[in-house]
């Protein structure tokens, strides 16, 4: 088991979400279930998140709870093969040409845009 300082140095993903009801921001670490806090500003939410992470890790170590380590990008190549209908391939090729970019760039744009929208609804 790592020490608290070793866990604190790991690159856990911090999520900051505007709190539309109360104002300010909600901060959480998705890899540390239940580790969340808030702050009136983004900066205060980040400071509070660091404090919450330390408290969460200390409690987990004390209670013997398994602590997940952050997901690593090393497990992902950045490439995958996708089979699509010919009609969609044609449409994507036409739209990317109209935008003056490669179809790969256009598909990356569409995936990123959709992922950002999907991320806000969770």
Image (tube, rainbow, N blue to C red):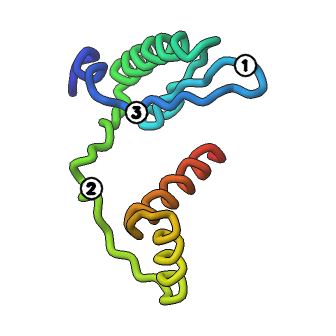
Q: Is residue 10 left or right of residue 28?
A: left
Q: Residues within 10 Å of mark 3 (few under 14, many from 20)?
A: few
Looking at the image, is mark 3 or mark 2 earlier in the sequence? Answer: 3
Q: Marks 3/2: CA distance?
A: 16 Å
Image height of 99 relative to 83, above or below: above
Q: Is residue 102 left or right of residue 37?
A: left
Q: Mark 3: which secondary structure? A: loop
Residue 56 % position (x, y): 44, 20
Left or right, 21 with respect to 98, comes to right
Residue closer to the observer: 99 or 108: 99
Residue 112 in the image, given as x and y percentages of width and height: 49, 53
How packed mark 1 is, by other alpha carbons closer than 10 Å (few <14, some 14-19, many 20 or more), is few
- For this rendering, which residue is in front, 113 or 64? 113
Which residue was labeled with disc 1? 23
Label 3 close to label 1 by CB (< 8 Å): no
Secondary structure beneath dot 2 equals: loop
Task: Find numbered disc 1 in the image and state the secondary structure of the residue it sits on.
Answer: loop
Looking at the image, tell me whether mark 3 or mark 1 is earlier in sequence order: 3
Distance (Cα) linking label 1 and label 2 = 36 Å
If the image is split into quadrants, where does the N terminus sit? top left
- Tell which residue pokes out farthest to the bottom in this image: 86
Q: Is 90 left or right of 120, judged from the image as shown?
A: left
Q: Which residue is labeled 3 in the image?
A: 13
Is 50 located above or below residue 31 in the figure?
A: above
Q: Which residue is mark 2?
A: 76
Q: Tell me where residue 64 appears, x and y as whole percent.
A: 34, 27
């Amino acid at each position: 088991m790592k020490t608290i300082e070793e866990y604190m140095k790991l690159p856990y993903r911090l999520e900051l979400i505007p709190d539309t009801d109360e104002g300010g921001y909600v901060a959480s670490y998705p890899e540390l279930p239940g580790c969340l806090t808030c702050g009136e500003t983004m900066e205060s939410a980040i400071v509070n998140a660091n404090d919450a992470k330390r408290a969460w890790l200390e409690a987990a170590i004390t209670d013997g709870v398994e602590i997940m380590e952050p997901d690593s990008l090393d497990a992902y190549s950045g490439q995958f093969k996708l089979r699509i209908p010919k009609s969609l391939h044609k449409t994507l090729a036409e739209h990317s040409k109209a935008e003056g970019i490669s179809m790969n760039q256009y598909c990356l744009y569409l995936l990123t845009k959709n992922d950002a929208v999907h991320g806000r609804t969770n």
